[in-house]
Image (tube, rainbow, N blue to C red):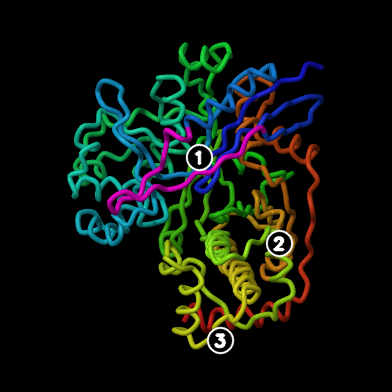
Amino acid sequence: MKKHTFLAIDLGATSGRSVLITLSHGKIEMQELTRFPNNMLELHGKYYWNIYALYQYIKEALTLCAERKFPLESMGVDTWGVDFGYIAPDGTLLGLPRAYRDPYTDGVPDEFFKKISRDEVYRLTGIQVLNFNSLYQLYAASREQFAPLKSAARILFMPDLISYLLTGVEVCEYTAASTSQILNPVTGCFEPSLLEAVGIPPTLFANPVSSGTKVGCLTPALAMEAGLPQLPVIAVAGHDTASAVVAVPASNPNFAYLSSGTWSLMGIETEHPIINNKSCLFNFTNEGGIEGTTRFLKNITGMWLVEQCRKEWEHQGHTYTYPQLVEMATDAPSFISLVNPDDSRFANPRSMTLAIADYCRDTGQPIPQSHSQYLRCIFESLALRYREVLDMLRELAPFPILQLHVIGGGSQNRLLNQFTANATGIPLKAGPAEATAMGNGLVQAKACGLVADRWEMRRMVAASVDLTDYTPCDTTLWQDAYEKYQRVILK
């Protein structure tokens, strides 16, 4: 049987990678080609993404594919959500895209709700209110008279912006657009009343296209420089979580997923959006999935807290690998201090450890006294936050949730996985770690007619990767901890 090979470009908020995805005999093989940093740039108080550096890294990956003579059939790009860039009438990229952690959106949702109420915004979009959503970024940019917005002929979300640099073709892929809080999930179109309230014309956005649509081919100049033919570029599930959910190795619909990385995203897959008073109260989001599905989920701050502590300690001369961090947390005493990982003070502090210490002091808890205690605090708090969100999902889901699938880099954290199984009280299956790149490649395979639907994709994933099962234990201890979490953190 012929092998089919695809290039997945997977860009996260802290790093990117290029991954070779090969389908053969009903299984998936993966080979990471390159890995590179993705750092926010602070310039005069504004935060940006260095998209030109990302383009250069992708070009290097393409050149490597040419040198190694990989028989690529197509490529696709997925990224984080909500962020975007501006394109001028002549096709020029108008500066660097602003980063979602830019403080220019602080307090902006409440200002916007004076124009259109919070309840109405949620009714129209079904999207969790987060201050960095595209809607509020655009409103903030409009208020500050941001020059690129004033000159733009088109707005492209990050995966589409990268594809545009590669091909010169503008598209708007549905799953990426759905994170914006401007798209109506019922109509599948951008909501005119929201754009009017922002003060921008609807012509700035192209009509959304489905995942698996061909964008175009590499520009002749780029193909020549890389040494490749004009490779087709596919609009995969452009939002990285949408790509990751493609690769959830579930055998039936009665599952919840936890995409665990810098952000954690917990949700379910549904055939229709869930937009009601309770989903609004719980601040859940309805984002696009492949094949017309909805990813009904909630964003949770994930390994961001650990990553920031790790960077801080590295600057102090203490360098730890992730296995060492897990081992340190394992040896620390349990349930000394807990935090709400989604507290605003953890969004982008100058010092994460000081922010955690302040939180513990303010809530009357002991302050962690060692790196190990900080880590234990974070991991236990994350597991309890997952329990809190899963309880909400159980109230809202149109089916019983029988299994939790943990995918993404966090699926390799055995301690956190066991904590999560203990806290939630349901069986947990971990893997694949590279779900996003795998889902990216599988959507390309579907575009080529090699797989029929998402369930065939998931069977292939289950047959191709080693999955780890976790059974809940110490449930009484964790129930007591959850009651403390509710009493101290959710009071």
Can residue 87 be seen here?
A: yes
Viewer-side label of 3, 2:
3
Residue 446 against residue 476 in the figure, above or below: above
- State how far apart marks 2 and 1 are (Cα): 25 Å
Within-10-Å neighbours for mark 2: few <14, some 14–19, many 20+ = many
6 to the left or right of 361: right
Numbered disc 3: secondary structure: loop
Foreground pick, 375 / 474: 375
Is residue 174 magenta-colored?
no
Residue drawn at (72%, 60%), measured in percent from left and top?
323
Within-10-Å neighbours for mark 1: few <14, some 14–19, many 20+ = many
Image quadrant of residue 244?
top right
Residue drawn at (46%, 73%), measured in percent from left and top?
355
Residue drawn at (78%, 61%), measured in percent from left and top?
470
Residue 57 against residue 279 in the figure, above or below: above
Foreground pick, 159 / 128: 159
Residue position marked by numbered label 3 in the rendering:
366
> Which comes sooner in the sequence, label 3 or label 1?
1
Residue drawn at (23%, 54%), measured in percent from left and top?
116
Q: Are marks 3 and 2 in contact (CB under 8 Å)?
A: no
Q: Give amino acid for label 3.
A: Pro
- State how far apart marks 3 and 2 are (Cα): 25 Å
Residue position marked by numbered label 2 in the rendering:
417
Is residue 44 magenta-colored?
yes
Viewer-side label of 3, 1:
3
Foreground pick, 156 / 224: 224
Instruction: State which quarter of the image contains the N terminus.
Output: top right
> Which comes sooner in the sequence, label 3 or label 2?
3
Part of the protein shown in magenta: 33-54
Residue position marked by numbered label 1 in the rendering:
79
